[in-house]
Amino acid sequence: MAETVISAERDKDSVTEAGAFLSERWGRLDPAVCLVCGSGWGKVVEDFGSGESLSYSEIPGMSQTTVSGHAGNLHLRELGNKQFLVFQGRRHFYEGVGWGPIRFPILLAKELGTETLFLTNAAGGLSPSFKVADLMVLRDHLNFMPGNPLIGPVLHPDSPRFPDQSQVYDPELRRLLCEVGEKHGVRIHQGSYLALSGPAFETPAEISAFAKLGADAVGMSTVPEAMLGNALGMKVVGLSCISNLAAGISEEPLSHDDVEKASAEALPKMKRVVRGFLEELLAQGLD
Ligand code: HPA
């Protein structure tokens, strides 16, 4: 507990320092949206043209990613004269770094005035209607991680001590994401995402139990960031690429290589949906 308290206090100081550093390096900063790219999603940034970029290790208080497919760069890009941030890669609880580095990007986005959080990930599919490379908008989640990223002092004046979680994922943005999918010929499911710490994939018995609990997809990220964004009063939207069928549903052994391969195959449609969604969001002023 003492450790959690100290790290939450540290978050505050280093987030302020990182915000000041970015404002000094990049000048006027008014990002409307913060996109966090999970496994396989980082290459969507190729479709946003040029702009400012920094490695996480250059930003005070940020630590570098350790997992393949998570480049570890922060980008500032613009669409229709509106700025947005792209965190290309994330830290995970299974890396053993605690909640601090997982919270940091979200707190930094909040510090810079961002009000919309767009979280992406690769996930294993449980729902019988899912195929590999399908996309799923998060309608809700089940937090099966060992703990809660909000434990400790309240992280921000905008965050209540006991945040409501009856609608973590913004319904208007979920609808918009599905509409954008339709417009671009990409079918997007909606479902519940169950988060575990990993790093081991699940057993077939666990997957069978999670399906009974209502999980449509399973993964090792996103939920802590969504909980924090929600607690900070941000609009949150989440999108999974079903990179594999979950253990026991698939006959095949699971591997991170296969997760990356499936995401690479789905990349063209991921790019269309992410860019289309950001364009609509910013043009319609829903950010
Ligand atoms: N389980 C957990 N996390 C994952 C999976 C999975 O099957 N696929 C991608 N991330």
Image (spheres, rainbow, N blue to C red):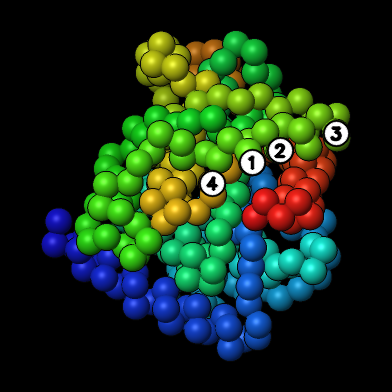
- Where 259 falls versus 279 (above or below)? above
Q: Nearer the viewer, residue 57 or 83?
A: 83
Which label is found at residue 59?
none
- Residue at 63% over, 29% down: 136
Judged from the image, the secondary structure of the residue bearing numbered disc 2 is helix
Q: Nearer the viewer, residue 22 or 167?
A: 167
The kind of residue on which mark 3 rests is: Lys
Mark 3, residue position? 183
The earlier-in-sequence mark between 1 and 3 is 1
Mark 2, residue position? 176
The earlier-in-sequence mark between 4 and 3 is 3
**Left or right: 184 with respect to 13?**
right
Q: Is residue 81 visible?
A: yes
Q: Say which of marks 2 and 3 sits in front.
A: 2
Mark 4, residue position? 236
**Quadrant in the picture for residue 13:** bottom left
Mark 1 and mark 3 in contact? Answer it, CB < 8 Å: no
- The 10 Å Cα crowd at callout 2, few under 14, some 14 to 19, many 20 or more, is some
Q: Say which of marks 1 and 3 sits in front.
A: 1
**Quadrant in the picture for residue 211:** top left
- Residue at 50% over, 78% down: 19
Residue 174 placement (x, y as % from top left): 63, 36
**Left or right: 260 with respect to 160?**
right
Judged from the image, the secondary structure of the residue bearing numbered disc 3 is helix
Residue 153 placement (x, y as % from top left): 22, 61
The earlier-in-sequence mark between 4 and 1 is 1
- Where 35 falls versus 182 (above or below)? below
The kind of residue on which mark 4 rests is: Val
